[in-house]
Image (cartoon, rainbow, N blue to C red):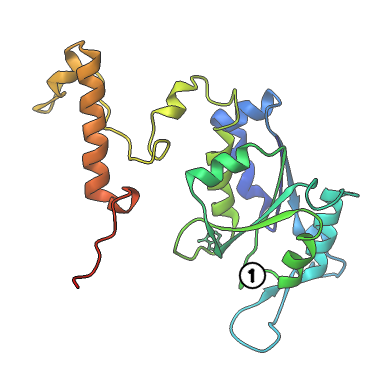
């Protein structure tokens, strides 16, 4: 998979040299390009923002540097349905979930545009929607200072789903959200620590009992912490 990122803080993504994603880059499973938006400005101050039309607080990112940067990545990219998926992280976007990560992991080319300040001039989004699939994606219902942290999270969630990135593919199956439930608790040696014991069923060697216990733990955790994940019928109001 090819991933391009446009940002005013390219150093933010230096950490993608580390760990599993770093290895995936070395082995060629992931090809990464990090582009400094300021390299696509043409004034002495390398200006990327300006005051909003209509007034209001904060600054808006100017369209011209974005146009220049994205054009240099897309080249003479073909029609919208064949071009890359262009993602603008935004608190005003659709919610990023494990299902989104799975969808994006199927793509061959992702382009991330990291906005700062009050966001990017809307015409950038509108223009590139004609040149690629554009998605505004939110990490969650809170506001970050910019898209960089959101992009890091998305790349990690997507990258680990690319075949070969995670050594043991079974570990992708048995984790939170893959089956719609939260993960069961895990234990390792020693079987007694600070007066706390490992649940005896895990030492029993009885695989069916272990699987049943783990499933029950998943249900219990999900019920307690994330009841919204359980497809329970919504209670209808009393007549
Ligand atoms: N940029 C600022 N806040 C964000 C959020 N919650 N998700 C994605 N991008 C953002």
Q: Tell me if 95 is positioned left or right of 85 in this view.
A: left
Residue, x 78% and y 49% (percent of image)?
A: 81
Residue at the extreme front of the image, as rendered: 239
1 or 44, nearer to the observer: 1
Q: Quadrant of the N terminus?
A: top right
Residue, x 55% and y 29% (percent of image)?
A: 20
Residue 190 seen in the figure: no
Q: Tell me if 206 is positioned left or right of 38 in this view.
A: left
Residue 159 at what x, y percent from top left? Answer: 59, 35
Residue 196 at what x, y percent from top left? Answer: 11, 28
Residue 106 at what x, y percent from top left? Answer: 64, 37
Tell me: is circle 1 under 8 Å from ligand 1: no
145 or 237, nearer to the observer: 237
* Image position of 204 with respect to 187: above or below: above
Q: Which residue is denoted by mark 1 in the rendering?
A: 119
Q: Quadrant of the C terminus?
A: bottom left
Q: Tell me if 133 is positioned left or right of 230 in this view.
A: right
Q: Which quadrant of the frame does ligand 1 lie within?
A: bottom right
* Image position of 82 with respect to 211: above or below: below
Q: Tell me if 120 is positioned left or right of 19 in this view.
A: right
Residue at the extreme bottom of the image, as rendered: 54
Residue at the extreme top of the image, as rendered: 205
Residue 132 seen in the figure: yes
Residue at the extreme right of the image, as rendered: 76
Residue, x 24% and y 42% (percent of image)?
A: 221
* Image position of 232 with respect to 59: above or below: above
43 or 96, nearer to the observer: 96
Residue 188 at what x, y percent from top left? Answer: 26, 21
For disc 1, the neighbor class at 10 Å (few under 14, some 14 to 19, many from 20) is: many
């Amino acid at each position: 998979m090819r991933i391009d990122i446009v940002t005013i803080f390219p150093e933010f993504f230096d950490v993608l040299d580390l760990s599993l994603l770093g290895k995936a880059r070395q082995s060629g499973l992931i090809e990464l390009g990090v582009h400094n938006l300021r390299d696509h400005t043409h004034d002495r101050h390398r200006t990327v923002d300006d005051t909003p039309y209509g007034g209001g607080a904060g600054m808006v990112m100017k369209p011209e540097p974005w146009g220049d940067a994205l054009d240099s990545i897309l080249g003479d990219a073909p029609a919208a349905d064949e071009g890359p998926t262009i993602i603008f992280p935004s608190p005003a976007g659709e919610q990023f979930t494990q299902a989104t990560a799975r969808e994006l992991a199927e793509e061959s080319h992702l382009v991330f545009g990291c906005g700062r300040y009050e966001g990017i001039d809307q015409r950038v989004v509108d223009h590139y929607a004609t040149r690629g699939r554009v998605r505004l994606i939110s990490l969650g219902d809170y506001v970050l200072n910019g898209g960089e942290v959101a992009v890091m999270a998305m790349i990690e969630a997507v990258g680990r789903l690319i075949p070969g990135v995670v050594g043991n593919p079974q570990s992708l199956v048995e984790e939170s959200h893959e089956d719609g439930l939260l993960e069961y608790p895990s234990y390792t040696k020693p079987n007694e620590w600070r007066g706390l014991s490992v649940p005896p069923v895990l030492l029993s060697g009885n695989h069916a009992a272990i699987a049943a216990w783990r499933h029950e733990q998943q249900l219990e955790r999900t019920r307690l912490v994330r009841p919204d994940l359980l497809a329970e019928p919504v209670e209808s109001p009393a007549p």
